Image (cartoon, grey):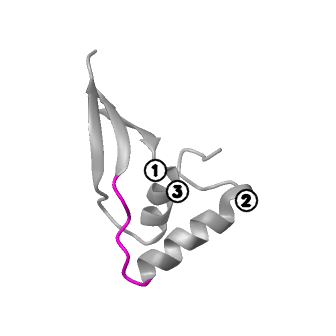
Amino acid sequence: MFDRRFRPPESSRHRWERLWTANRRGAPLPPISVFRLGDEHFVDDGHHRVSVANALGMVAIDAEVTELAT
């Protein structure tokens, strides 16, 4: 399970490294899927991609956003 800073668990290190390596070689990160509730966003799919983006210092990532009514 990822922590609040999107650090991956040791069990998913291999997947994380594959994404990181592919991105460093020029492959874009696929969009993540998030829910927006008010001013907050919750990742539904893409935790590894968010973690890699954070590690690479990216300030934005493409996302498919589903707005939830409050």
Sequence-wise first label, 2 or 1: 2
Q: Judging from the image, what secondary structure is the residue with disc 1 in?
A: loop
Q: Nearer the viewer, mark 2 or mark 1?
A: 1
**Proximity of marks 2 and 1: CB atoms separated by less than 8 Å:** no
**Residue at 59% from the left image edge and 71% from the top image edge:** 17
Relative to 46, does residue 18 appear above or below in the rendering? Answer: below
Residue 19 x, y percent position in the rendering:
51, 69
In this rendering, would 5 be left or right of 35?
right
Q: In the rendered image, which quarter contains the C terminus?
A: top left
Amino acid at circle 3: His
Amino acid at circle 1: Gly
Sequence-wise first label, 3 or 2: 2
Q: Identify residue for label 1.
A: 46
Amino acid at circle 2: Glu
Q: Identify residue for label 3.
A: 48
**Residue at 60% from the left image edge and 46% from the top image edge:** 3
**Proximity of marks 1 and 3: CB atoms separated by less than 8 Å:** yes
CA–CA distance between discs 2 and 1? 17 Å
Q: Identify residue for label 2.
A: 10
Residue 23 x, y percent position in the rendering:
42, 75
**Residue bounds of the magenta highlight:** 25-31
Q: Judging from the image, what secondary structure is the residue with disc 3 in?
A: helix
Residue 58 x, y percent position in the rendering:
35, 67
